Image (cartoon, helix red, strand yellow):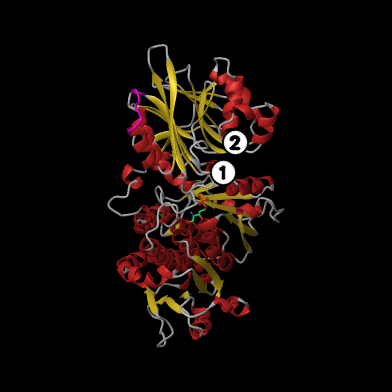
Amino acid sequence: MCGIIGYTGPLEAKTILLGGLSSLEYRGYDSAGIALFQSQTLTSHTVELIKTTGKVSLLKELCDSTPLLPSGCGIGHTRWATHGGVTTENSHPHQVGRVTLVHNGIIENYKTLAETWNFSKQLRSETDTEIAACLINQFYENDPIQAIRKALPYFEGSYAFCILFCDHPGEIYAVRKISPLVAAYTPSGSLAASDLTALLPYTKQYFVLPEQSIAKLTPYRITIFDENGDKIQPELLTVNWSMDAAMKNGFPHFMLKEIHEQPQALRNTILPRIVDELPNFDSDQIPDSAFVHVNKIQIVACGTAMYAGMVSKSLFESMLKIPVTVSIASEFRYEDPLIDENTLVIIISQSGETIDTLAALRLAKEKGSVTLSIVNVKGSTIARESDYVFYTHAGPEIAVASTKAYSVQLAALYLIACRMALACGKMTLEEGKHFLQELLCAIPAIDMVLTKKEEIRHAVSHLTSVDNAFFIGRGRDYAFSLEGALKLKEISYIHAEAYAAGELKHGTIALITDQVPVIAIATQEAVYTKMISNIREVKARGAFVILITKESASIEEGIADIHMTIPNLDDSFTVFPIAVILQLIAYYTSVKKGLNVDQPRNLAKSVTVE
Ligand code: M6R
């Protein structure tokens, strides 16, 4: 949550910072601000703050109307409020004495620090961040690295800071703990930012700032000092994402673009891992020995990633005949889970930086389990700390609502299930090949759904005027429903809940009244007739039923108000086209309601605070 950026170099910093903040805006969009060095003479420097509540576009307008000297060095921030309301005073950057900084994270002990150091009189905001600026300023005696080094041990919580010291023009100091920060030296200057999307216009080579080291950015180089003050060389990473990947490319929203990217994202994730028609993880350096001793699988994630895990549960169990538990990371991390060295803990995270998921990973490692993460962002903290990493190749996902990341997470889980089953002798080579062929058939099935998007757009008209909606399904269809309901509520603000259809009669059916929308998913052969009975029950109580089945399903007259179909896939694979229908239902509902599809209220893409 929150995006930070720093730039120093030969170009106009204001333009680079504002451009970077636009790409980071999905991380938080309550308010935004920049700070720029202003040099009146060779020896007289100030740091000018420009900040506002609202979006980066407002900040741009404010910058345009503020008289500024040309500047090649500055820092910027786009905020998701945690401590203190959405006000200009609480927006970053914060300036105290000679220190100006931007922060992503939470300084949990900020109140104690304020009391201990008697900072309250100098505070202008209600933020934890301003206390950090106070403390660094307190320790500042003309040596930035020393001041930061002295302040860091006092901070409890998480942080990524970009810091300016007004008597060190052209220099930016950066440091992080838990919160992400990537950096790059490029021919256009030196940059640091919360994520890669802000660096993409300038470079494909970058590094993740090692925790607790301090980076000094100048226009000519980036120097990194470890805890002992020794210089260290970071590991350079190369990203294969293009700038196009982080742009809308003619689509009205990132979400729609990302929905359309799913077939390619799936191909990019699956095809390089097929060798001799079977899944092969040699290039991921995930050996079969990681699987053979496993007698339990524990999946941990948040939100959409967790729902991908829920879909895979029955697949793993049916293929491997071992128990699989799926847990919400924010709960798991405070439990005493029954896992050990024979448990494979699968951690799923698009960003690789979700704080609860990271904490769950650390707990699993403490318990001695083997950890395998499914991550989209290369070099992210979760990827680096896991025993094994399976990178999905979805490219950057910018819309807050996750779409393509979900599909590739599923593909990853399916490939892992198949590889494990082969490694453990639970599947023959022929069965493995057949499984992969079926998985690949899901890709044209998605293409087919995408050709029907106009039909889906018309179908959602009924949803735009309702306050509540229900998603129902049985078996795997229920797991798909959970994600469908999350998608609808997060971008259309309709209260949407998913229920196992058989549970309706145990309470929820009381909420089914005239014209209440029920999105019923019925793709699982084994429970199809039961599901149809449940649909009849809600229809009899006046529900407006949108029914989704396979093409081959025979549907009785009058059971649904709208009937949508997906190609006839094996039951295990119907999730792929179903996911796309559910994403499009949420997307078009949000568009028709005139809402901000890509940046829904109160949310941010990466949840890096508890
Ligand atoms: O980056 P992660 O996959 O760890 O994020 C987990 C959730 O925050 C995320 O899936 C969230 O639920 C989505 N924005 C929902 O669309």
Please indicate, yes or no, whether residue 247 appears anywhere in the rendered image: yes
Name of the residue lying farthest toward the top: 43
Please indicate, yes or no, whether residue 212 appears anywhere in the rendered image: no
* Location of residue 264 by image quarter: bottom left
Q: Which mark is residue 572?
A: none
10 Å neighbourhood of mark 2: few (<14), some, or many (≥20)? Answer: many
Q: State whether the magenta stretch is mostly helix, strand or loop.
A: loop
Per the image, the residue denoted by label 2 is 128
Tag 1: amino acid: Thr
Tag 2: amino acid: Asp
Q: Which residues are magenta?
A: 65-71
Q: Which mark is residue 82?
A: 1
Mark 1: secondary structure: loop
Is 396 inside the magenta-drawn segment? no
Query: Whole-Å distance between the Cαs marked 1 and 2?
Result: 9 Å
On screen, 421 above or below 461? above
Is 70 inside the magenta-drawn segment? yes
x and y, in percent, of residue 570 in the image = 44, 72
Q: How many marks?
A: 2
Q: Residue at x 63, y 78 (%)?
A: 506
On screen, 518 above or below 281? below
